[in-house]
Amino acid sequence: MEQKFYPLLFKIADTKSKKSQNIFIRLNIFILLLLILSSVSSIYTTVPKNITTFSTICLILSTLFNIYILFFRPEKSWYEGRAIAESVKTLTWKFITNTKPFKISLQQEKAEQIFNENLKKIIGQRRDFYILIGQNYPDGNMISDEMISIRNCSFEERKKKYVEDRIQDQINWYSYKTKQNALNKNIALGLIICFQILAIFFFIFEKNLFINYSFTSILITMTSVFMTWLQLKRFQELTDAYGITATELKFIKEKSKFILDDNQLEKYVDDTETAISREHTLWLARRDNIELYK
């Protein structure tokens, strides 16, 4: 199912989360770049006045960005928006597959009432985010015609839709992110090693020659910056976590061929959503404990 057919609350939370994520990541990139630029003065043994002024300005700006992150906490909106979006997704798929608490025996109006009540509970658990979106919280029914249409399909159609549009979609996403994080980790580690080797080379070179400049300090700074970036993005942790989740979902998908009725589908959907939610809960826990070198 395309994202445009999800409840409006999903779209709002997803959009806000992505914007906050971009702000948080970009701010940290700016901070690291400013730290590199501020270390330019360390190249010279006798520092020109204009270079000293430039380095000072860079340090002041990096401090201001850190203060902004400390007080406005854009990462909080990122995490909470993502948590709401994923919870709405899970609730949506339970609704359209007729699984608890939206069993097939329920009348349509009752199922819709329970769905909207659960949406209120989700947003109620993230009050700071609710205040943040303010008047953007949508009015009216959250349930799209596409959701109702799928809910009213036959057992086989609902099962096929869930396996292809939910499970396979998640497998594709986790598999892609696993490869992407593994590649980014290798690039970051490669750069760290290169800067360390260059720092050693220049240290030995500069000690044996009388020169009025030094690149050792700035190379050490570059090493520290990429180590910080590696810590911020947690490439290795995410590679392992996403890889495990993708594998688990592949096993779950294989079990779909043994689902023969709505009762079995209910347990199957519940187990699958639990697996997806577990990884996301661990992601939130890891993100809540981020420590940056600021």
Image (tube, helix red, strand yellow):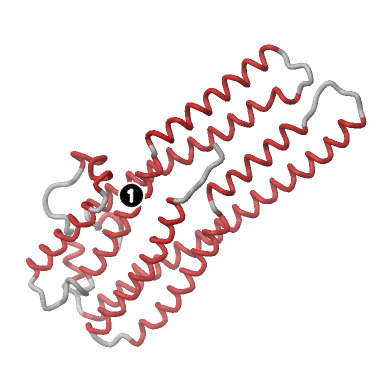
Q: Is residue 109 left or right of residue 213?
A: left
Residue 105's place in the image compared with 9, above or below, is: below
Point out the image quarter for the C terminus. Answer: top right
Q: Could you tell me which residue is drawn at 81 percent across and 41 percent down?
A: 200
Q: Name the residue under label 1.
A: 80
Residue 58's place in the image compared with 85, above or below, is: above
* Coordinates of residue 179 in the picture (x, y in percent): 56, 60
* Coordinates of residue 155 in the picture (x, y in percent): 22, 80
Q: Which of 21 and 60 is in front in this view?
A: 60
Q: Could you tell me which residue is drawn at 42 percent across and 56 percent down?
A: 285
Residue 32's place in the image compared with 118, above or below, is: above
Q: In which quarter of the image is residue 154?
A: bottom left
Q: Could you tell me which residue is drawn at 64 percent across and 31 percent down?
A: 36
Q: In which quarter of the image is residue 68?
A: top left
* Coordinates of residue 262 in the picture (x, y in percent): 22, 82
Q: Give the secondary structure at mark 1.
A: helix
Q: What residue type is labelled 1?
A: Glu
Q: Could you tell me which residue is drawn at 77 percent across and 16 percent down?
A: 46
